[in-house]
């Protein structure tokens, strides 16, 4: 009981906000992880993990049967669900992928603005644990397990400052990486006919009879809006 009470106190205690200079340095580090190609090849795995998790959550909420998730070393991923090949449920499932990092980043920014750094980290850990049981390939298992180990280590052993910096770093990577992922989607669709046929935007186009570029613009506008709102929550704009 004492352990549970201590844990509850830990996740409900508000941390003091990071000093503005430390916050800006952390956001600058996140920007480097997103903008520098060598770093982006690694940090993009975080965006893919959340992207596929978004598909999985949306599929479950819309009544589809989740068949599993695969994460690949080239930062691609696949979420399989079973149900009607069309209709609102499938549209919702397809929409959720590119929007998930932006919305998760926005929610994380709001929690950080309220001082709930530790609670955010434990929510991330719980989400990773739920995702782990749906992974269907070895790289995906390793990727989710390694991510969970890092989050657990920071949550359990990190000081308040370390927890705050790590939580802000992940939040900023989600918000900035979501926008870059959409820009990459647009570039890939422009250069590859096969990619254009299989992308979320073009699958949405076939279901809704709206051009794929419309959905790319929707993803981009929402991503930029979430990044701006998130920065506002964190007092950076």
Image: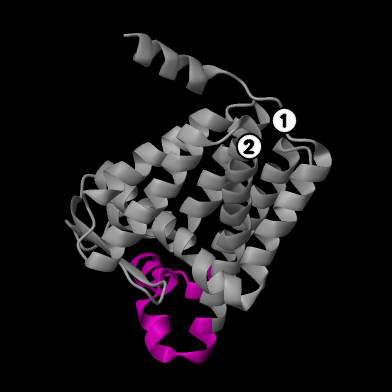
7 relative position to 90: left or right: right
Q: Are marks 2 and 1 in contact (CB under 8 Å)?
A: yes
- Residue placed most toward the observer, 104 or 169: 169
- Please provide percent x and percent y for residue 60: 25, 45
Residue 53 visible? The answer is: yes
Q: Which mark is residue 32?
A: none
Q: Is residue 38 above or below residue 117?
A: below
| Residue 202 highlighted magenta (yes or no) | yes
Figure check: 37 above or below 160: below
Q: Tell me which segment is drawn in magenta.
A: 188-216
Question: Magenta: predominant secondary structure element?
Answer: helix
* Mark before the other along the chain sequence, 2 or 1: 1
Front residue of this view, candidates 181 and 209: 181
Asked whether, in this view, residue 27 is left or right of residue 12, the answer is right
Residue at x-position 49% and y-position 23%: 11
- 143 on left or right of 210: left
| Residue placed most toward the observer, 13 or 232 | 13
Residue at 69% x, 58% y is 29
Q: Which sits in the foreground, 226 or 166?
A: 166
Identity of the residue drawn at 37% across and 88% down:
194
Q: Position of residue 55 (x, y in %)?
A: 34, 55
Look at mark 1 in the image and give the residue it sits on.
Answer: 17
Q: Is residue 162 above or below residue 181?
A: above
């Amino acid at each position: 009981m004492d352990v549970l009470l201590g844990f509850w106190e830990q996740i409900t205690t508000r941390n003091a906000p990071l000093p503005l200079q430390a916050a800006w340095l952390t956001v600058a580090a996140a920007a480097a992880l997103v903008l520098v190609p060598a770093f982006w090849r690694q940090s993009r795995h975080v965006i893919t993990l959340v992207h596929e998790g978004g598909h999985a959550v949306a599929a479950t909420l819309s009544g589809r049967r989740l068949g599993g998730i695969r994460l690949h070393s080239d930062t691609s991923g696949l979420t399989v669900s079973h149900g009607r090949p069309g209709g609102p449920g499938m549209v919702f499932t397809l929409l959720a992928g590119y929007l998930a990092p932006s919305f998760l980043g926005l929610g994380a920014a709001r929690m950080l603005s309220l001082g709930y750094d530790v609670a955010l980290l434990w929510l991330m850990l719980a989400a990773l644990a739920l995702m782990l049981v749906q992974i269907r390939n070895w790289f995906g298992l390793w990727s989710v397990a390694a991510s969970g180990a890092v989050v657990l280590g920071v949550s359990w052993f990190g000081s308040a400052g370390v927890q705050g910096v790590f939580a802000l770093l992940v939040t900023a990577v989600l918000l900035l990486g979501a926008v870059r992922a959409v820009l990459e989607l647009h570039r890939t669709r422009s250069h590859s006919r096969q990619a254009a046929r299989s992308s979320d935007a073009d699958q949405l186009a076939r279901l809704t009879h709206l051009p794929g570029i419309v959905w790319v613009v929707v993803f981009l506008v929402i991503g930029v809006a979430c990044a701006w709102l998130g920065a506002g929550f964190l007092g950076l704009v």
